[in-house]
Amino acid sequence: MTSATSFLFVAIHLACIRAGNFSETFVELECKEEYHGVYGQQSLLECIVKAVQNVTILTVTWKRVGGDAILLEYHKHENASALGYKFAMPSWNNKNMNVSLLLTNTKMADKGVYECMVRTDSGDATVTMSLSVTAMYKSPTMSSSPENCIKQNTDVTIFCNTTGGHQKGLIWWFDEFGTNCTGSAELVAKKTDDTLFSLSSKLTILKATYSGSTNYSCTVHNTNGVQEGKASFEIPFVCSAVGVIGSLIIGLLAALLILKRRSVQRARRQSTLPLMRDSGHPTDRHHDDEAEGKVILTV
Ligand SMILES: *[C@@H]1O[C@H](CO)[C@@H](O)[C@H](O)[C@H]1NC(C)=O
Ligand SMILES: *[C@@H]1O[C@H](CO)[C@@H](O)[C@H](O)[C@H]1NC(C)=O
Ligand SMILES: *[C@@H]1O[C@H](CO)[C@@H](O)[C@H](O)[C@H]1NC(C)=O
Ligand SMILES: *[C@@H]1O[C@H](CO)[C@@H](O)[C@H](O)[C@H]1NC(C)=O
Ligand SMILES: *[C@@H]1O[C@H](CO)[C@@H](O)[C@H](O)[C@H]1NC(C)=O
């Protein structure tokens, strides 16, 4: 058989199947072949009943292929569903052709093949579709040790941490000049539960200085190398704003304390005032106060 005739055979064969199917079914289910879910989020398996005329739905059954348990069912005017599964349409009724299934909190174990079966007063339809589930790493958080007020020429360790991936991911490091420093970093991956990982990578910078790179970035990648998150971190050579405000408050408190101590001294002195008046220097105390005021202001 030449390739041209074999093509013709295949084409005729396909045409027959199409025509056959079309003449037999008045009702079809339109769903995608593949759906992609994300761990911890909702997943929608969208299926719409298509019919040439108005139909009334008699039963809807959603289940996993290879599993006996029914996830969602409409039968004899009653809905039944397993925990975490429901009609995607909020108040679905049997005139509603949108029979989509909603998984309210997708788990890694929800990955698999699903089957939707619909019976109507004008025919039946069954369709299968697959659901894949991925879990993405969250945007990383960065910190350093020492945390703050780092002195020049001291060693600094920078951390880049993230959680949430379902496979052991990677963390890459770059300095502010774009140099890849991943080689000097140490990555620790841990399973946080049965399925998810946490990653912590630490990069130690020996004798960090202003003249070198002071801004480091880390990127999180899944096992396929696809970037899922990025963060950057400036080495905290100067004390942070919180530190500055903190020392201002301490300074203020110290000033208040001095003020209070002075007023106590003044009170003591006032009790000896009559004697001083007699000695003929009535303005001395006033000058004293002014001097004290200046001292306090310059604290
Ligand atoms: C189908 O149903 C709609 C709304 O229920 C109605 O307006 C329409 O006339 C019906 N069509 C047929 C062919 O029965
Ligand atoms: C079916 O219902 C779901 C949930 O309301 C909605 O997200 C989806 O777009 C609907 N599909 C169609 C084709 O109307
Ligand atoms: C990152 O992980 C390390 C080691 O577990 C920890 O010492 C550090 O505090 C963490 N940093 C952040 C920002 O979570
Ligand atoms: C950075 O370095 C790591 C480890 O050496 C390597 O796997 C990665 O491909 C590098 N990334 C880039 C963008 O050069
Ligand atoms: C550090 O570098 C990143 C880009 O690599 C930049 O987006 C960020 O603004 C820089 N941070 C500071 C504080 O300069």
Image (cartoon, rainbow, N blue to C red):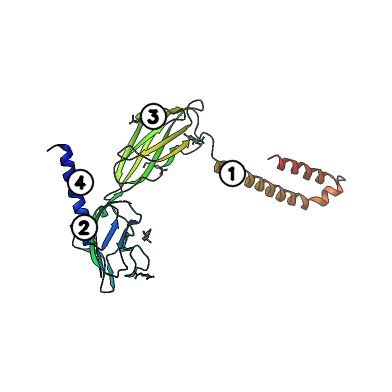
Which quadrant of the figure contains the N terminus?
top left
Residue 177, position in %: x, y?
A: 46, 27
For the residues labelled 3 and 1, say whether their Cβ atoms are less than 8 Å apart. Answer: no
User: Considering only order in the chain, which callout, 4 or 3, is on the residue closer to the N terminus?
Assistant: 4
The residue mark sitting in front, 1 or 2, is 2
Q: Secondary structure at mark 1?
A: helix
Residue tagged by mark 1? 245
Number of residues whose C-alpha sits closer than 10 Å to that of mark 1, classed few (under 14), some (14–19) or many (20 or more): few
Q: Does residue 83 lie above or below 197 as drawn?
A: below
Q: Which residue is mark 2?
A: 21
Q: Could you tell me which residue is drawn at 21 percent across and 51 percent down? A: 15
**What's under tag 4, amino acid-wise?**
Ala
Distance between the alpha carbons at the discs numbered 1 and 2: 77 Å
Residue 84 in view (yes/no): no
**Number of marks in the rendered image:** 4
For ligand 3, the image quadrant comes to top left
- Is mark 2 in CB contact (under 8 Å) with mark 4? no
Q: Element type at marker 3?
A: loop
- What is the CA distance from the residue labelled 3 to the residue labelled 2? 60 Å
Q: Are marks 3 and 2 in contact (CB under 8 Å)?
A: no
* Residue 11: assigned label: 4
- Look at discs 1 and 4 and give the one toward the viewer: 4
